[in-house]
Amino acid sequence: MSAGSLLSRILAVAVIVVVGMLLIRVAQHMVNRVERKNRNQGLAARRTTVYRLLISVTRYAVDFLVIVMVLDQFHVHTTAIVASAGILGLAVSFGAQGLVQDVVTGLFLLYEDQFVVGDFITLPNLSLSGTVVEVGIRITRLRGSSGELVIVPNRLILEVQNRSRGQTTVSVMVPVSSAEDPDRVHAVLQAAVDELADTTPGVKVAGIDSFTVGQVMWTVTAPADYEKGAMVDKALKAKIARVLYTNGMVAGAAKGSPHE
């Protein structure tokens, strides 16, 4: 190998390395720019993790290409290396197909911000509900209603109902004796609703829901965030029970008859 030929190859290798470094720098700059742009929009830590992962994947891919191109400059047969990498990747994709699906789905869950730790979610296809404990690249951990820890592979998460985002309607059924004057019952319940209006906007007396022998079922409703639904429900029941007691209204039986 002549000195001129060696020098030209060394220069080619230098160019390849410099171009590879520039590609990595450009990728890092673009990802960091997107990250800074979204930081003021409440970018979650998991999105930052995704960005870092993208940078790492880009770096590995560019490094591999640089190595192959450098070896090619010195007439090393890189075809076998590329073929081996392809065969290895194919073997991994077949042998760990579920793992790959878990990771890909996990990345989308993280990036799309479908739920965060602390959210109460339902997975309809798994008939599963619980509070999110951890959102990982491969698995998601939920805390069930009985306190059990449920570990779900991300590939099984096909549909998510996030009950911590948006509102629900709390409905409280109020059984009142059929001997009570409906106008008086409505007035009493409306007074209770008016007192709750400041702390529970949107609360209202929905009216009579049903009636049976000796009993009329009234309904009081209120909108609430999903995570505050139970608290609103308890507040409504406590206030209504107090109002019924204060006004001497008997639930479930004719007025003046013994309690059942």
Image: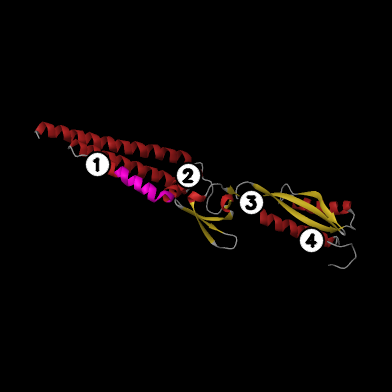
Callout 2: few (<14), some (14-19), or many (20+) C-alpha neighbours within 10 Å?
Answer: some
Which residue is denoted by mark 3 in the rendering?
226
Q: Measure the alpha-carbon separation of dots 3 and 1.
A: 58 Å
Q: Measure the alpha-carbon separation of dots 3 and 4.
A: 25 Å
Looking at the picture, tell me which residue is in the foreground, 218 or 100: 100
Which residue is denoted by mark 4 in the rendering?
242
In the rendered image, residue 112, in percent from the top left (x then y), is placed at 50, 43
In the rendered image of this protein, does residue 109 appear above or below residue 73? Answer: below
The residue depicted at 90 percent of the width and 54 percent of the height is: 181
**Decide: marks 2, 4 in contact (CB < 8 A)?**
no
Which one is closest to the eye, mark 3 or mark 4? 3
Is 86 colored magenta in this rendering? yes
Which one is closest to the eye, mark 1 or mark 4? 1
Is 172 colored magenta in this rendering? no
Which residue is denoted by mark 2 in the rendering?
108
In the rendered image, residue 163, in percent from the top left (x then y), is placed at 61, 50
- Label 2's element? helix
Q: Measure the alpha-carbon separation of dots 1 and 4.
A: 82 Å
Which one is closest to the eye, mark 2 or mark 3? 2
- Label 4's element? helix
**Decide: marks 2, 3 in contact (CB < 8 A)?**
no
2 or 3: tag closer to the N-terminus: 2
Q: What stretch of residues is rendered in magenta?
A: 85-98
The residue depicted at 45 percent of the width and 52 percent of the height is: 138
